[in-house]
Image (spheres, grey):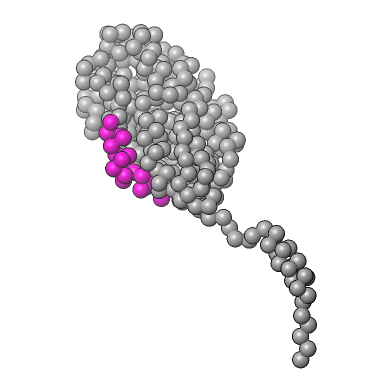
């Protein structure tokens, strides 16, 4: 049998061509993240208590659990109560797993309420997790007002600071005005909750409605309740928190009709997500799963727990599956209640 030999020069040429062809082997998660930087976008200004405290504590810890050990940096992107950052992550940021959103939970209602510029779909985001469950509340600065109960706020005007009419600090007081008869006067435009706190201390405003109990009891404001600098007027969630004094009423219980209560349930539903984080809808599945696994491990890391302890931040994590279910549930709310919620906030 005759076997034709390929000339050596031709063989070398063929091998060279084959070597130049792109590899069909998929890049691993570790290979992708090695040498990369993940930006953790916080949808509010610096000094926003727990909202920025959690990602700041997480960044140096979680990198060791992510394949390839990428760098992580925290970047603040305030604007329109989180709408700017959420839109950026869905529409502008690379969909490759290097952009990670840490935005106050109220932003996820924006598309449901059809707010201007809210052109994103929270139900399609890749939700990663939340480090703690919390409840929102409303408070007053005692030195600036005589109001001490939510009933007092139904009789006397209280000026409250807000980051945006589209964020919790704008939505909640307006809803309470319409449904419970409170007299909150809302001043918007503050860059973040930290800026609202400064305004409180300066006497520019008398209170804020829609920040979390966790944020109040962390950082520089951790002593405000204990030292009676502030008074908590109302809880804003789907159920009462065991950490807040029992005499502080739940906003839902102030509703005068079952229909009004259902509207408040729509507005309060995001509170169940705590301090949620997510990646864009186009991030490859293997990278999303890698970040989710790393997140679970970081939540159990003693260095992370210690960083939270120093900031008086709670640790009661919500996993990706539960968080995804909560968000999808929000977008499956009864249309009649959602429509009334939109009508309740006509200027949005």
Image position of 77 with respect to 272: above or below? above
Across and down, in percent, residue 324 comes to 44, 45
Tell me if 77 is positioned left or right of 323 in this view: right
Does the rendering let one see residue 339? no
Tell me if 21 is positioned left or right of 117 in this view: right
Across and down, in percent, residue 46 comes to 43, 24
- What kind of secondary structure does the magenta stretch mostly adopt? helix
Q: Is 125 or 14 nearer to us in this picture?
A: 14
Across and down, in percent, residue 327 comes to 44, 41
Q: Quadrant of residue 45?
A: top left
Tell me if 286 is positioned left or right of 180 in this view: right
Residue drawn at x 29%, y 39% is: 305
- Check residue 303 for magenta coloring: yes
- Check residue 40 for magenta coloring: no
- Assign the N terminus to one quadrant of the image: bottom right
Image position of 299 with respect to 250: above or below? below
Q: Which residues are magenta?
A: 293-310
Tell me if 53 is positioned left or right of 34 in this view: left
Q: Is 218 or 233 nearer to us in this picture?
A: 218
Residue drawn at x 56%, y 33% is: 88
């Amino acid at each position: 049998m005759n076997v034709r030999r390929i000339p050596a020069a031709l063989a070398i040429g063929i091998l060279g061509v084959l070597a130049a062809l792109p590899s069909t082997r998929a890049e691993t998660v570790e290979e992708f993240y090695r040498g990369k930087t993940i930006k953790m976008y916080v949808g509010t200004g610096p000094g926003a208590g727990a909202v920025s405290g959690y990602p700041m504590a997480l960044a140096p810890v979680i990198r060791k659990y992510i394949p390839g050990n990428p760098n992580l940096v925290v970047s603040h992107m305030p604007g329109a109560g989180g709408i700017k950052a959420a839109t950026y992550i869905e529409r502008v940021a690379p969909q490759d797993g290097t952009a990670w959103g840490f935005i106050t939970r109220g932003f996820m209602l924006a598309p449901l309420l059809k707010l201007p510029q809210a052109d994103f779909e929270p139900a399609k985001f890749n939700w990663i997790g939340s480090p703690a469950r919390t409840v929102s509340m409303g408070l007053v600065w005692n030195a600036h007002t005589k109001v001490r109960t939510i009933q007092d706020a139904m009789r006397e005007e209280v000026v409250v600071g807000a980051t945006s009419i589209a964020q919790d600090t704008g939505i909640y007081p307006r809803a309470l005005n319409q449904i419970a008869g409170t007299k909150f006067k809302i001043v918007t435009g503050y860059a973040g909750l930290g800026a609202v706190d400064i305004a409180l201390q300066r006497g520019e405003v008398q209170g804020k409605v829609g920040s979390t109990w966790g944020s109040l009891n962390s950082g520089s404001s951790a002593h405000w309740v204990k030292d009676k600098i502030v008074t908590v007027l109302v809880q804003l969630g789907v159920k009462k928190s065991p950490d807040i004094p029992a005499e502080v009423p739940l906003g839902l219980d102030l509703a005068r009709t079952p229909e009004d209560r259902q509207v408040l349930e729509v507005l309060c539903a995001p509170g169940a997500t705590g301090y949620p984080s997510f990646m864009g809808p186009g991030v490859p599945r293997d990278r999303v799963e890698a970040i989710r696994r790393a997140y679970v491990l970081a939540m159990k890391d003693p260095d992370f727990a210690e960083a939270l302890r120093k900031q008086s931040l709670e640790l009661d994590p919500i996993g990706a599956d539960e968080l995804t279910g909560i968000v999808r549930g929000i977008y499956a709310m009864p249309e009649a209640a959602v429509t009334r919620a939109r009508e309740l906030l006509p200027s949005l």
